[in-house]
Image (cartoon, rainbow, N blue to C red):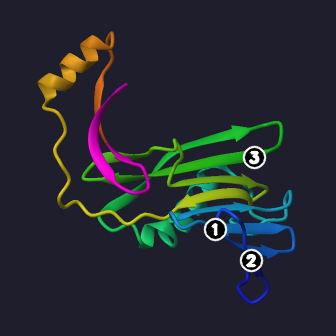
């Protein structure tokens, strides 16, 4: 959105909302920024006239990430975690997540650091979660033996060490995969 053309206003749940034509960007206090545009009318992520391929979509989305949430992530890296394609509406969904000290950061909401829907090279929808992480002062999780016992009590699976982000605090914990 063009900051000179977009019209800002506030909503009841306190996000700042920017509108430009059929595009809307909401900025929430917790760092979440959902974006929505009219069908095929969003900003171009891939240069016009370029054939849209999965590799091109991933490269363009990753470049976008490195110049947005990646600039402010602190000790975290932003890693590509998935791409899918919906043939019914010719839309790619790209997802990226934060990684700290080699461990994934899982948002309590179940969301991703970035989810971006791309149609014909244009951003149709996106959700960005801006976070700045440090790797100092986090409490250690249960020892591995206790994690294994918890897995056995749950009926099996694989213990996976993660950081869990509930938008106010981050804790390191084991989940059963």
Neighbour tally class for label 1: few under 14, some 14-19, many 20 plus, Cα within 10 Å: few
Foreground residue among 125 and 15 = 15
Q: Residue at x 27, y 48 (%)?
A: 102
* Residues tagged 2 and 3 counted as in contact (Cβ below 8 A): no
Element carrying mark 1: loop
Residue 36 seen anywhere in this rendered image of the structure: yes
The residue indicated by pointer 3 is 91
Q: Which mark sits nearer the N-terminus, 2 or 3? A: 2
Q: Which mark sits nearer the N-terminus, 2 or 1? A: 2
The residue indicated by pointer 2 is 9
Residue 44 seen anywhere in this rendered image of the structure: no
Q: Residue at x 48, y 67 (%)?
A: 69
The answer for how far apart the CA atoms under marks 3 and 1 are is 31 Å
The residue indicated by pointer 1 is 14
Residue 67 location (% of width, % of height): 51, 73
Q: Residue at x 29, y 47 (%)?
A: 171
The answer for how far apart the CA atoms under marks 2 and 1 are is 10 Å
Residue 77 location (% of width, % of height): 36, 59
Q: Is residue 18 left or right of residue 177?
A: right
């Amino acid at each position: 959105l063009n900051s000179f053309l977009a019209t800002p206003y506030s909503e009841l749940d306190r996000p700042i909302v920017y509108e430009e034509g059929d595009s809307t960007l909401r900025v929430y206090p917790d760092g979440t920024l959902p974006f929505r545009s009219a069908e095929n009318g969003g900003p171009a992520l891939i240069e016009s006239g370029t054939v849209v391929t999965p590799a091109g979509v991933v490269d363009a989305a990753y470049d976008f990430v490195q110049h947005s949430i990646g600039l402010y992530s602190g000790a975290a890296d932003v890693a590509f975690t998935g791409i899918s394609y919906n043939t019914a509406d010719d839309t790619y969904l790209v997802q990226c997540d934060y990684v700290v000290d080699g461990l994934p950061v899982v948002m309590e909401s179940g969301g991703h650091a970035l989810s971006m829907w791309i149609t014909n090279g244009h951003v149709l929808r996106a959700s960005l979660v801006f976070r700045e992480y440090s790797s100092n002062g986090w409490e250690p999780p249960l020892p591995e033996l206790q994690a294994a016992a918890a897995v056995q009590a749950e009926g099996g699976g694989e213990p996976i060490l993660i950081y869990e982000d509930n938008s106010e605090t981050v804790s390191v914990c084991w989940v059963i995969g």
